[in-house]
Image (tube, helix red, strand yellow):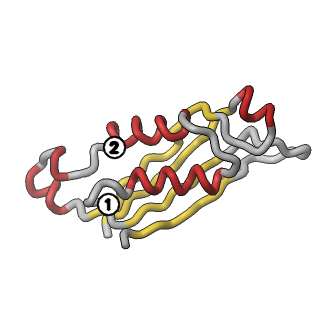
């Protein structure tokens, strides 16, 4: 399985269980790794034969900036669902980072990673 990765995609969202998270929002950072067969694109050298990662990035940002959810687990699932709408994507790993999570201790990152495969 070949992989196409988008790492460090940033957008502001209003996800979280606390009112201030919903009101103020915060930056989320997303990594996606798509499992695809890149041989058709390699043969034709055509964007139409692969995943357009620019277009996919825009769709992912729409989800991050869109309807708020309580948990980053839910956000990760929504992002995975977007990736799997492309029939060329067989599997996807999604990591949602919440670097501004409301934790009362010093930390570098909070993240959730999920792996999903097509049916």
Q: Position of residue 57 (x, y in %)?
A: 41, 39
Q: Position of residue 33 (x, y in %)?
A: 43, 57
Residue nearest the viewer, comparing 49 with 59: 59
Labels 1 and 2: the sequence-earlier one:
2
Kindly identify the residue that appears in the image at 80 percent across and 35 percent down: 19
Looking at the image, is mark 1 or mark 2 nearer the viewer?
Answer: 1
The residue that disc 2 covers is 53
Q: Would you call the spot at circle 1 few (<14 residues within 10 Å), some (14-19), or many (20 or more)?
A: many
Q: Position of residue 99 (x, y in %)?
A: 71, 42
Kindly identify the residue that appears in the image at 53 percent across and 57 percent down: 77
In the image, is residue 11 above or below residue 106?
above
Horizontal placement of 81 versus 114: left or right?
left
Q: Would you call the spot at circle 2 few (<14 residues within 10 Å), some (14-19), or many (20 or more)?
A: few
Q: CA distance from mark 1 to mark 2?
A: 12 Å
The residue that disc 1 covers is 89
Kindly identify the residue that appears in the image at 14 percent across and 59 percent down: 40
Q: Residue furthest top?
A: 24
Q: Are marks 1 and 2 in contact (CB under 8 Å)?
A: no
- Helix, strand or loop status at disc 1: loop
């Amino acid at each position: 399985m070949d992989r196409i990765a988008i790492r460090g995609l940033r957008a502001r969202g209003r996800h979280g269980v606390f009112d201030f998270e919903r009101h103020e929002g915060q930056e989320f950072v997303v990594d996606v790794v798509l499992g695809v067969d890149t041989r058709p694109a390699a043969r034709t050298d055509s964007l139409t034969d692969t995943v357009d990662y620019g277009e996919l990035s825009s769709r992912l940002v729409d989800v991050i900036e869109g309807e708020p959810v309580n948990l980053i687990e839910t956000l990760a699932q929504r992002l995975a669902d977007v990736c799997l709408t492309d029939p060329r994507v067989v599997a996807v790993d999604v990591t949602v980072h919440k670097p501004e999570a409301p934790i009362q201790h010093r930390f570098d990152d909070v993240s959730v990673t999920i792996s999903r495969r097509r049916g």
